[in-house]
Image (cartoon, rainbow, N blue to C red):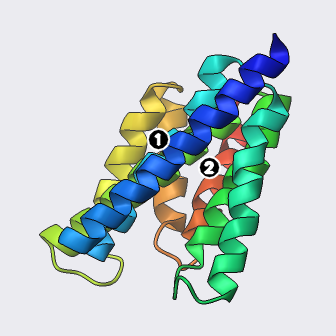
Amino acid sequence: MGFAIDFASLVLGYLYVSLAIFLHEKIRRKYDEFVSRKILHILVGNAILIPLIMGASIWAAALPSFSFLIINTILLKKQFWKGWEGIISYPFSVLVLTYFGYTFDFIYLLLPIFILAYGDSFASLMGKLMFKSEKKSLQGSLTMFLTTFAISLVFLNPIQTLAVALVATLVEGSKWDNLTIPFAVAGTLYLIL
């Protein structure tokens, strides 16, 4: 039964991410690359739920991130994507946090990745689309803080939520925020739980 669940989780996970990439391409062609990348950022973050809901093993949860890390690295080196370093750091973060989530507690996987997927995306969208800012803005930071606070309240008490929201907001906005956000959140969780 375990192999069947793992296999089904892998098939659903790859189908879901493929559908997210397809949707990204449709939106990119019709509207805007920036918006489509942020939608992809959110959708891919949701993929971590598939193996968890299905009760899949750690290898079935980690294999998609590992394979996309390899595939994306090859595609980036072949210049299929230009300036998309996050396409490597995102699956790397998910891969590392999958280990911590399955080894210690799933909060070490879920909360950091949801904050990365939603908080970072909403902050960027708000800053660029609503306030026309190309760089980190006060409005984007406020959006990051509020989004992180709302997500964290599902998992943590208000004081812990405040700590996580502050840390995530402080590290958001760097070129490497696909690494800094999830690892800073995971480190904060380790300290406060």
* Residue occupying the point 58% across, 70% down: 87
- In the displayed structure image, the side of residue 108 where residue 148 appears, left or right: left
Question: Of label 1 and label 2, which has the lower sequence position?
Answer: 1
* Residue occupying the point 58% across, 29% down: 50
Q: Quadrant of residue 59?
A: top right
For label 1, the crowd category at 10 Å Cα-Cα, with few meaning under 14, some 14 to 19 and many 20 or more, is some
- Classify mark 1: helix, strand or loop: helix
- In the displayed structure image, the side of residue 107 where residue 15 appears, left or right: left
* Residue occupying the point 32% across, 47% down: 146
Q: Which residue is mark 2?
A: 185
Q: Which mark is residue 162?
A: 1
73 up-or-down from 68: above or below? below
Numbered disc total? 2
Residue 153 visible (yes or no): yes
Residue nearer the viewer, 127 or 18: 18
* Residue occupying the point 52% across, 88% down: 82
